[in-house]
Amino acid sequence: MSDRNLPVLYTFRRCPYAMRARLALYVSHQVCQLREIVLRDKPAHMLEQSAKGTVPVLILEDGTVLDESLDIMLWALGRQDPYGWLTPSAGTLSDMEDLIAQNDGPFKQHLDRYKYPTRYENVDPMEQRAGGALFLEDLNARLEGQDYLFGQTQSLADMAIFPFIRQFANTDRDWFDGLDLKPLQTWLAGHLEMDLFKAIMVKWKVWSEGQDVVLFPDAAS
């Protein structure tokens, strides 16, 4: 297959939405052309394909555009799911989607206002941190007595949520590490040490026309 026939992925290395898309693409052996962008200088082609102007954006070989990270995960895992991320050892796909919705909705709102308070009016970052901590406590309770959010095996929920917990924790790592949330802290540390995570966090050069990089060619072997 020539590179021209590969899906094209617009991504930004540190974006948690893009991280989880890359995790699913890698684990499902979906080789892509990667285009690492700078958010303040978005490529015209990306904006033509997705007017939202956010990453990730995956353009399939037939021209179909997926510009929601969870849709990209479900597409990739629907093609190949070698570790059963879509079939957790406890709970259902619908249950996982409900938990992910809590992460992407209320928790993400707290995260943004805690990490970037100057972007919003009349925001107290400590109040936002406290609001986000309620979700951390819920996750911690889930992890009491089990290694992952839906049982003893990693699932879609773990992979879709941990990049956001990473970002929340890194906003004030001393505070996070001092919380009485040992199961959650252990869960996060384990995900950060995965070879899979390290593979999708390689530092790519910013993309320019004609400079495509083949994403994860070794994953397809």
Image: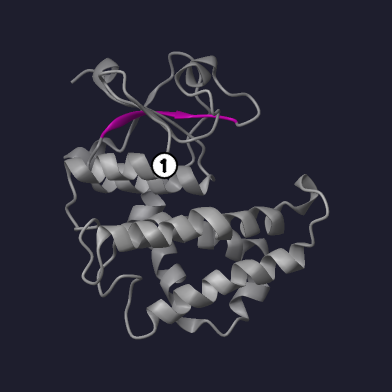
Residue drawn at the location 79% of the way across and 57% of the way down: 123
- Residue that carries the numbered disc 1 in the rendered image: 69
The answer to which of 17 and 36 lies nearer the viewer is 17
Residues drawn in magenta: 31-38
Is 165 located above or below residue 1 in the figure? below
Whether residue 202 is visible: no
- Residue 62 percent coordinates (x, y): 25, 18
Left or right of 152? Residue 169 is right
> Residue 82's spot in the image, x, y percent?
16, 53
Number of numbered callouts drawn: 1
Residue 145 higher or lower than 5, as above or below:
below
Point out the image quarter for the N terminus.
top left
Q: Give the class, few, some or many, for how many residues have Cα within 10 Å of label 1's Cα (few <14, many ≥20).
A: many
Q: Is the magenta stretch mostly helix, strand or loop?
A: strand
Q: Nearer the viewer, residue 57 or 108?
A: 108
The quadrant of the image that shows the C terminus is top left
Q: What residue type is labelled 1?
A: Ser
**Left or right: 94 with respect to 210?**
left
Examine the structure image and report whether residue 129 is included in the region drawn in magenta.
Answer: no
221 or 158, which lies in front?
A: 158
Instruction: Check the image and report above or below for 201 versus 143.
Output: above
For image coordinates 48% across by 14% down, the residue present is: 209
